[in-house]
């Protein structure tokens, strides 16, 4: 039920292969790969060739978060590079329906993300085809920012819509997730937790992953 997805944005980029193995051995479920193009967000990270290179080192589920202006044009590249789940932004320039269909056609799971100012209702027309929805809990672009507690209302609204329709769509949160904020996100209804700095900057990353998981699970078991 709870999935922990360490974001390599906070890792040592000079050794992404061994960093991904470290996450796999540390008990991560997914590997979160933040693709930024310097247009949709004011930062540039990496693209499909780098993901393809990491793919050789780990069998973790690749959770690819596209923060790019025109995701539709690159879906096939990311699928071929080894993406398992592809998330794009509803605020991007690509038509959402076509982009979701393209992701599914390429054999990946589809997910849509909303930035903090975007109402979550904007993804509702596509929910039936989605495996996951990503609610950003910081402005996308950079790691190490503070979790926005006010996103809880969006998480709750999405959780109740998913339940109302009898779907099994995961809710991912991304940005500022750590030991102080994870329970708040889980309590609102998030079950896939992205963590960059909280995992990679920890003295013991395996311990950090285990702690986040235990804290989130305890919220669910108390409900
Ligand atoms: C931000 C990225 C996040 C980021 C999270 O645009 O989408 O995945 O790496 O980093 P932390 O967990 O440090 O806030
Ligand atoms: Zn991300």
Image (cartoon, rainbow, N blue to C red):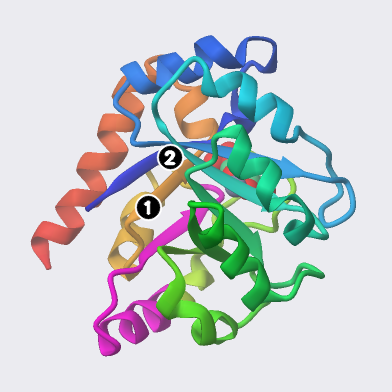
Whether 145 is drawn above or below 114: the answer is: above
Q: Left or right: where does residue 37 sit relative to residue 200?
A: right
- Binning the other alpha carbons within 10 Å of mark 2 as few (below 14), some (14 to 19) or many (20 upward) gives many
Task: Residue 188: give x, y in percent of width and height.
Answer: 34, 70
Query: Observer-nearest residue: 164 or 178?
Result: 164
Q: Position of residue 14 (x, y in %)?
A: 69, 11
Residue 36 visible, this orientation: yes
Disc 1 crowd, CA 10 A, few/some/many (<14, 14-19, 20+): many
The answer to whether residue 115 of the structure is visible from this angle is: no
Q: Which quadrant, please, contains the C terminus?
A: bottom left
Quadrant for residue 196, please give it: top right
Query: Does the magenta run of residues contain 212?
Result: no
Which picture quadrant has residue 58? Answer: top left
Give above or below for 196 relative to 205: below
Identify the residue position indicated by label 2 in the image. Answer: 5
On the image, the x and y values in percent for residue 209 come to 33, 31
Contact between labelled residues 1 and 2, with CB atoms less than 8 Å apart: yes
Q: Is residue 56 above or below residue 44?
A: above
Q: Which residue is mark 1?
A: 192
């Amino acid at each position: 039920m709870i999935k922990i997805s360490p974001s390599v944005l906070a890792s040592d980029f000079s050794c992404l292969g061994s960093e991904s193995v470290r996450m796999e051995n540390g008990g991560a479920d997914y590997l979160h790969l933040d693709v930024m193009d310097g247009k949709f967000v004011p930062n540039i990270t990496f693209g499909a060739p780098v993901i393809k290179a990491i793919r050789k080192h780990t069998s973790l589920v690749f959770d690819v978060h596209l923060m790019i202006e025109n995701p539709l044009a690159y879906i096939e590249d990311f699928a071929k590079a080894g993406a398992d789940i592809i998330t794009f932004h509803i605020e991007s320039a690509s038509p959402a329906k076509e982009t979701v269909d393209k992701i599914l056609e390429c054999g990946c799971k589809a997910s849509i993300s909303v930035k903090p100012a975007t109402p979550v209702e904007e993804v509702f027309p596509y929910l039936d085809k989605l495996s996951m929805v990503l609610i950003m809990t910081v402005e996308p672009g950079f790691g190490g920012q503070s979790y926005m507690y006010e996103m809880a209302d969006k998480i709750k609204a999405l959780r109740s819509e998913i339940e109302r329709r009898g779907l099994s769509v995961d809710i991912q949160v991304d940005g500022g997730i750590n030991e102080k904020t994870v329970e708040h996100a889980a309590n609102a209804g998030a079950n896939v937790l992205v963590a960059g700095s909280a995992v990679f900057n920890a003295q013991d990353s395996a311990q950090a992953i285990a702690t986040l998981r235990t804290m989130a699970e305890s919220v669910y078991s108390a409900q």
